[in-house]
Amino acid sequence: NDHLSGATAGVELFRRAAQSQQAQQDQQGRSDDTLADLTRRVEQDRDSLLQIMTDLGITPDRSKIALGWLAEKAGRLKPNGHLFSRSPLSDVLELESMLLGVRGKAACWRTLRALAETDQRLYTDHLDTLVERAEHQCASLEEMRLTAATRTFGTERPTGR
């Protein structure tokens, strides 16, 4: 249920960030659906978590789901002088939060994958897919985070040195 709470907050954050990115792109005449695609996958992952909970006989705790939803909303309030608008750091901070959430999700999938070796209620192939998908999501988010950080801080893109 704790992961479900986090997944609920994560889905809300991904949706908001994707909407914000779309609005920015519309203004600039650009098009990049990477974040929107990630949002759809994160929603599917939350659905997978709910199915796994059902398979394990775990009842979703509605209060924890609501807490995750509220936590994401509360996270929007920040004393940075941009209460109703986005600050220059918004993209970087959101991408860092999303990346941390996906890393937590990947850890959950890896734990369940290890348990699947002895628990027939868990499906190894499905969990392997979820682990791989989380790893790809992390790679995409890290690329986006570095791009946003470079844009925000006005420095050259790191070359790996």
Image (cartoon, rainbow, N blue to C red):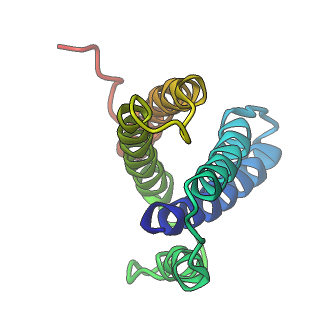
Q: Nearer the viewer, residue 108 or 120?
A: 120
Q: Does residue 36 sit above or below 3 in this rendering?
A: above
Q: Position of residue 132 (x, y in %)?
A: 51, 23
Q: Report the side of 159 relative to 19 (left or right).
A: left
Which residue does the image show at 42% across and 55% down from the upper left?
97
Q: Residue furthest left?
A: 161
Image quadrant in which you'd find residue 99: top left
Q: Position of residue 63 (x, y in %)?
A: 56, 86
Q: Is residue 34 left or right of residue 86?
A: right
Q: Position of residue 35 (x, y in %)?
A: 66, 40
Classify 79 as above or below 155: below
Q: How many circles with numbers are drawn on the protein? A: 0
Establish if 11 lies above or below 127. Answer: below
Q: Quadrant of the C terminus?
A: top left
Q: Is residue 115 above or below residue 23?
A: above
Residue 108 picture location, percent across and down: 40, 46
Q: Nearer the viewer, residue 57 or 138?
A: 57
Q: Residue at x 43, y 67 (%)?
A: 2
Q: Residue at x 48, y 60 (%)?
A: 90
Which picture quadrant has residue 14?
Answer: bottom right
- For the point 75% across and 34% down, the residue is 33
From the viewer's side, name the closer residue of 4 and 30. 4
